[in-house]
C-alpha cells in the first residue's frame, strides 16, 4: 500500500460521511434518537459506533490505546455528533496526510479495549477503518432512506468519478 492509495480511501471515507451527515441533518430529534433493527440500534448508535472506530484506531496509530468507548449517550443531538465527527475527521486526515509509504507497510502495536496486546500492519488497519465505516454508513443510509432522507449513492465508484 502507498500513501496515494490510502489518501484516496480516506478522502472517499470523508465524502461518504458527508453524504450521510447531510441527509441526517434533515431529521427531527425523535428520528435521530429512534431505535432501529440494526446491530448498533438506530441512527445515533450506528453513527456513534462508526465514529468510535475512527477515533480509537487513530489513537492507536498515534501510539495510545484507549480503554474506554465513545457512547451514543454522549450525543444528545445530531448537531453534537456531527461537531464531534468533524473534529475527529480533521485529526484523522492530518494523520493520513503525514503517513509515509514506509510507515504504512510497517507493523504497529497497541492494546485492545479488553487489555490484549496486538500487532498489525498499519495500512491493513487503516483500510479496515474505511471498510468498517462503509458497512455502518450503509446501515445508516438504510435508516435514513426508511425515514425519507436517502443520502443517495455512497459507493466508492461514484466518489472515484468525482475525485480529482
Image (cartoon, rainbow, N blue to C red):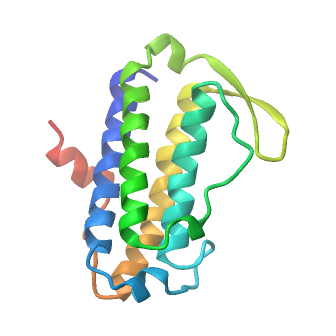
The image quadrant that residue 109 belongs to is top right
Disc tally is 0
- In this rendering, the answer to whether 129 lies above or below 28 is above
- The residue under the point 33% across, 65% down is 20
As drawn, is 71 to the left or to the right of 92? right
- Residue sitting at 53 percent across and 28 percent down? 123
* 57 versus 135 height, above or below: above
Answer with the quarter of the image where residue 141 lies: bottom left
Task: State whether residue 125 appears in this view.
Answer: no
Q: 89 or 136: which is nearer to us?
A: 89
Query: In this rendering, does residue 143 appear at all?
Result: yes
The x, y position of residue 9, in whole percent, is 37, 39
Task: Give the image location of residue 52, x and y in percent.
Answer: 57, 53
Residue 117 is situated, as x and y percent measured from the top left of the image, at 82, 32
Q: Position of residue 99 (x, y in %)?
A: 44, 19
Observer-nearest of 2 and 23: 23
> Compared with residue 162, is residue 65 higher up or lower down, i.e. above or below?
above
* Residue in the foreground of this view, choosing between 83 and 20: 83
What residue is rendered at 67% in x and 22% in y? 108
Q: Is residue 151 left or right of residue 81?
A: left
For the C terminus, the image quarter is top left
Q: Say which residue appears at 36% left-offset and 24% top-offset.
A: 97
Amino acid at each position: 500500500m502507498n500513501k496515494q492509495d490510502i489518501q484516496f480511501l480516506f478522502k472517499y471515507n470523508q465524502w461518504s460521511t458527508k453524504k450521510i451527515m447531510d441527509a441526517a441533518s434533515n431529521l427531527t430529534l425523535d428520528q435521530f434518537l429512534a431505535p432501529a433493527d440494526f446491530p448498533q440500534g438506530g441512527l445515533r448508535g450506528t453513527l456513534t459506533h462508526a465514529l468510535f472506530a475512527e477515533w480509537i484506531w487513530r489513537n492507536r496509530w498515534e501510539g495510545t490505546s484507549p480503554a474506554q468507548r465513545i457512547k451514543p449517550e454522549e450525543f444528545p443531538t445530531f448537531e453534537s455528533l456531527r461537531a464531534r465527527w468533524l473534529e475527529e475527521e480533521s485529526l484523522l486526515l492530518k494523520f493520513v496526510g503525514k503517513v509515509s509509504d514506509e510507515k504504512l507497510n510497517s507493523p504497529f502495536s497497541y492494546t485492545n479495549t479488553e487489555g490484549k496486546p496486538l500487532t498489525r500492519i498499519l495500512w491493513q488497519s487503516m483500510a479496515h477503518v474505511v471498510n468498517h465505516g462503509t458497512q455502518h454508513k450503509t446501515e445508516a443510509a438504510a435508516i435514513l432512506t426508511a425515514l425519507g432522507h436517502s443520502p443517495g449513492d455512497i459507493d466508492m465508484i461514484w466518489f472515484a468519478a468525482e475525485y480529482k
